[in-house]
Image (cartoon, helix red, strand yellow):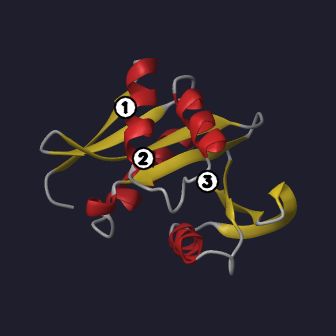
Amino acid sequence: MGQGIITSVKEPEQCSEIVKQVLADLPEWFGLPESTASYIEEAATIPLWQARVDGELAGFIDLNCTAVRSAEVSCMGVMKKFHRQGFGTALMHVLENEAKQHYDFLQVKTVDEGHYPEYDQTIKFYERMGFERLEVFPTLWDLWNPCLILIKKL
């Protein structure tokens, strides 16, 4: 992972700006304006970690409490130029280490397999991180984007 540094970000406006910058670089995953705006807005209210390389933003991950004993990777993104360099894995490890202190389970939602190649890659990433498929909700988002929930015991 080169000279990457991962840090927690506390300033709400900075959190939103980080998410905005990264998601703008990933239209294949974050191409729906209303959901992208929701991720940007939410980032100001939940814990967020950023990855930087020589001061340049490489990616982020944030964590949302969903129940007393469980939390969710609400949103995660790595700038395209930093894909396949270990930043997603490093961000996930930092988030999991924090989540273990407060929660027993971690979940993530993504588009189910077989609909978009980019999301098929996303599912493979989460499975490499130890997540398991729990359930598909065919219409949680819309008919074209069935929601797959993956879970992990911390």
Mark 1, other Cα within 10 Å: few <14 / some 14–19 / many ≥20: some
Q: Marks 1 and 2, how far apart in space?
A: 21 Å
Tell me: 76 left or right of 151.
Answer: left
At 26% from the left and 61% from the top, the residue drawn is 81
Q: CA distance from mark 1 to mark 3?
A: 20 Å
Residue at the image point whose x is 53% and y is 33% from the top = 40
Residue 127 lies in what quarter of the image?
Answer: bottom right
Q: Residues within 10 Å of mark 3 (few under 14, many from 20)?
A: some
Residue 59 is situated, as x and y percent measured from the top left of the image, at: 35, 48
Q: CA distance from mark 2 to mark 3?
A: 31 Å
Q: Which residue is mark 3?
A: 154
The reply to whether residue 102 is visible in this rendering is: no
**For residue 154, above or below residue 63:** below
Mark whose residue sits in front, 2 or 3: 2
Q: Is residue 21 left or right of residue 53?
A: right
In the picture, the disc for residue 24 is 2
Say which residue appears at 42% left-offset and 47% top-offset: 24
Q: Secondary structure at mark 3?
A: loop
* Residue at the disc numbered 1: 8
In this view of the protein, which residue sits in the foreground, 81 or 148? 81
